[in-house]
Amino acid sequence: MVLVGAAVLPHGTMIFDGDPHSESVACRKRNSTMPTGLIKQCSALYSSCERAADLLAKMNPDVVILVTPHGLSLSSGSLGIYLASVAQGNALWNDEWREVELNVPLDSQLAAQLLEFVQQRGIKADGVITFSMMEAPIRWAEVVPLWFINSKTDSDKVKYVIVATARNTEGLDVIGKAFHEFVSGLEQRVALVMSGDLAHTHETTCNIPLYLPDPGSNLKPSEIAVEFDRMWEMWARGIPYGDDVLKDTGQVDEVHPWVARQCSPWLDRILEDNPIAKACGRRSIPILQSILEKESEEGASVTSHFLGRWAPTYYGMMTVVFKINK
């Protein structure tokens, strides 16, 4: 088997409002009435997700494994591995984006194998069975990234596996190593996609309620949000650790070698600051770091194709694709 690549993709539904030609009447209307700065960033995010999906499609994966922080949550803290044969849902958020729908085939047999594999290695995990094996429900954190990938790949060829980290916050590097070991024993070509956004504590001048946090969420602006997201960017671009490089580059669509040992200090800083910055993607990055690190140890080289980072309102989003060269 070949782990052909990986990606970090955002899941903010406002991304869909960046497409002036959207099939959604509501998205087109919002696009035509949004403030210029907001349109610009949402459009850039939309384009970056399209580009990421193109890059992943060119890797010709047979299976895409999606790791989501907002899927069906297990109160035990276990990983939730979807065992249905189909995932179906829409991007519903704040009572909008319901019309952005998605239906994708799941590889239920492979999901069951993954479940057994991680359980045998002592990782807390449970299978998620929905409505006597009917369609597994999905929402924005799964629909947004998979919508772009599904639009660029052969739907008759590619199947998906969905894993929800949900409440799991411990042993993420161990989970990454187990995922890598499992994938390494497969015959299929696999791409790994991490759904996650950055700091949810940015200052914003946006006054459109649809794009603002729920008043009950207790998300307050923090002084570290901007620097925190820059650290994500440095990690994603493969920039060796150092405060002297912690600045905005303004560059997108750039390619760098990615070396795990040079990037792990960024990860340490990110995890240290996350309690204040509040990134829902914080559970994704240690898993992915561990997987890419194992690839490097086994002689592969990793290339980062950084596609951009933005914070249109109170939370940041980033798009990056990693190509694994054996």
Image (cartoon, rainbow, N blue to C red):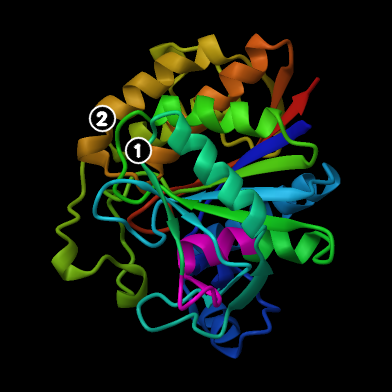
Disc 1 designates what residue?
226
Is 131 situated left or right of 297 in this image?
left
The magenta stretch is: 130-146
Image vertical order of residue 209 relative to residue 301, above or below: below
Is 90 situated left or right of 166 in this image?
right
Residue found at x 26% / y 25%: 272
Percent position of residue 206, x then y: 33, 66
Percent position of residue 135, x then y: 56, 75
2 or 1: tag closer to the N-terminus: 1
User: Foreground: 15 or 107?
Assistant: 107
Image vertical order of residue 169 relative to residue 210, above or below: above
Q: Secondary structure at mark 2?
A: helix
Whether residue 129 is visible here, answered yes or no, is: yes
Q: What's the residue type where badge 2 is placed?
A: Asp
Is 273 situated left or right of 231 in this image?
left
Disc 2 designates what residue?
273
Question: Tag 2: Cα neighbours inside 10 Å, few (<14), some, or many (≥20)?
Answer: some
* In the image, residue 77 lies in the stretch drawn in magenta: no
Residue found at x 57% / y 66%: 84
Residue found at x 33% / y 58%: 73
Residue found at x 35% / y 38%: 226
Whether residue 223 is visible here, answered yes or no, is: no
Percent position of residue 258, x then y: 64, 19
User: Foreground: 125 or 68?
Assistant: 125
Q: Quadrant of residue 127?
A: bottom left
Percent position of residue 106, x then y: 65, 62
Q: What's the residue type where badge 1 is placed?
A: Val
* In the image, residue 131 lies in the stretch drawn in magenta: yes
Image vertical order of residue 85 relative to residue 307, above or below: below
Contact check, label 2 and label 1, Cβ < 8 Å: no
